[in-house]
Image (cartoon, rainbow, N blue to C red):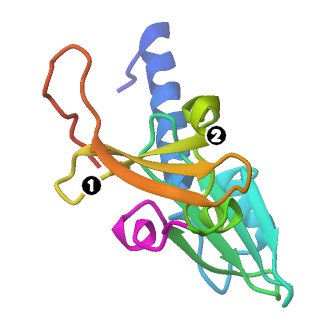
Amino acid sequence: MKIAFSAGVRMMLVFATFVLAACASYSGSNLKPGVSTLAAVIDSMGPPAMSWKNPDGSEQLAYPRGPAGTQTFMAYIGADGKLQRIDGVLGMANFALIQPGISKDSVLRLIGPSQPEWTQSYSGSNTVSWTWLFCNSQDEQSYFDVAFDATTGVVRSTEQRLKQVLSGIGNVPPCGQ
C-alpha cells in the first residue's frame, strides 16, 4: 500500500526531522566521553561561543543556549583531544561560586557568556551587568544577574529573580524540559 503525502505534510516531516536532529546535539548527548574527539564535539554542537586552552593542553568550550534556552554547556576536552565530559553549568552550585571580588574571566569559565542583548551598562554607578536565563529548583524560568565594577571587571554582586510573563502579571513560565 502506497501512502501519498501532500507537499505541506512532506515539509512538516522534513522540518520535524531537522528539529529532532538539532535537539540531539543541543546538549551533546550524542557524544561519548573518552571516545568523541574535539572535531566531533564541534560537528555536533557547533562552534563554541568561547574556548580556553589550559597549560596542560586540555581545552574548555562554552555553549550558551540562550536567549530562549535555559542552559549553558561546557565541554571539556583532554590533552589527548578526546571529550572528558559535558556539564550544564547554569545552576546553584556554580552560582554559589560567583562571589564579590572574582573576575569576569572567572565568571566566564564558570557559567559562560551571557547573551549580548542582556548586557547592561550603568555609567552613573560604573557598573556592567550580565544576565543568564536558567531553570530554578522549582522548574521555573529565572534570571541570574551578575554586576561588575566597569573599571576593574570584578564582581560586585549577584541576584536571582523569576522571569515574569509579560501577558500575565505574576505568572512565571515553567521550564518544560
Residue 127 x/y as whole percent = 60, 42
Q: Quadrant of the N terminus?
A: top left
Q: Is residue 171 shown above or below 92?
A: above
Residue 92 part of the magenta segment: yes
Q: Residue at x 51, y 35 (%)?
A: 67
Find disc 2 in the rendering and name its residue.
Answer: 126
Q: Residue at x 50, y 53 (%)?
A: 24
Q: Is residue 164 shown above or below 27?
A: above
**Amino acid type assigned to the residue bearing label 2 in the image:** Asn
Is 26 or 140 nearer to us in this picture?
140
Q: How many marks?
A: 2
Residue 15 part of the magenta segment: no
Residue 33 x/y as whole percent = 60, 82
**Amino acid type assigned to the residue bearing label 1 in the image:** Asn
Find disc 1 in the rendering and name its residue.
Answer: 136
Q: Main secondary structure of the magenta part?
A: loop
